[in-house]
Image (cartoon, rainbow, N blue to C red):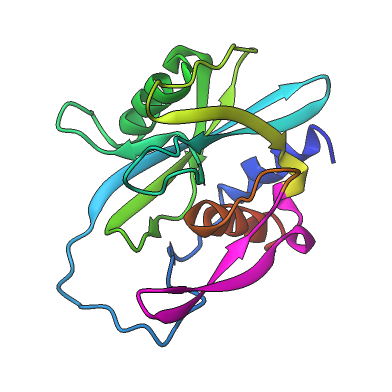
Amino acid sequence: MKTDSLDLVIAALARSSAASSDYDLNPETELPAERKLRPAGVLVPILVEANQARLFLTKRSSALKHHPGQIAFPGGKQDEGDADIVDAALREAREEIGLCPTNVEVLGRLPAHETVTGFIVTPVVGRVRSRFDPVPEIGEVEEVFNVPLAHVLAAENFQIQSRFWRGVSRRYYTVPYGPYYIWGATARILRSMADLTVSK
């Protein structure tokens, strides 16, 4: 798959699907019905260059209090000044990786995802119109890198692993690429996108 991998994603955005959750692989977890989730938006930025679609991701700073060193989409919580969740995702991408909103064509949204940290995350898929030089946000982002979109659309590249969290064994998706260990919410959102590309 080359540029047609982006075509698969565009077609997938037109399909309906249930929201995902960090708890999907742990159905025994009991969640309080009255829990309040904070809205957040992340950008799924895809650049097609030399006939290949590539997805940009970040490696969070190891000095951060929450999720240090983890692989993530550029994004964050919706602020009062944001017009909507798409605006939040674009703003965060500008701040975290130096991607100008005018350089992004918003293609659509993936199903929302609930995280163990109490956020309801909306992934916003965007085609990056032209090459840009990523600028990692000092103190927040350690590295900006990209992976072939085809890699994260292939179900066979995903694994289910587990580790102890708060005293219990928790299962989660991973989709490793080279030196990058992509797991948790990021991998779960990517798995949702991969599943939608093969849905009838």
Q: Is residue 40 above or below residue 18?
A: above
Query: Residue 156 at x, y = what percent?
Result: 79, 63
Which quadrant, please, contains the N terminus?
top right
- 186 or 194: which is nearer to us? 186
Residue in the picture at 17% in, 62% down: 36
Query: Residue 37 at x, y = what percent?
Result: 22, 58
Horizontal relation, residue 136 to residue 162: left or right: left
Boundaries of the magenta span: 152-176
Horizontal relation, residue 156 to residue 166: left or right: right
Q: Is residue 159 above or below residue 106?
A: below
Residue 6 part of the magenta-drawn span: no
Residue in the picture at 40% in, 55% down: 112
- 174 or 47: which is nearer to us? 174
Choose top left, top right, bottom left or bottom right for residue 155: bottom right
Number of labels in the image equals 0
Query: Residue 45 at x, y = what percent?
Result: 56, 31
Query: Residue 190 at x, y = what percent?
Result: 59, 52
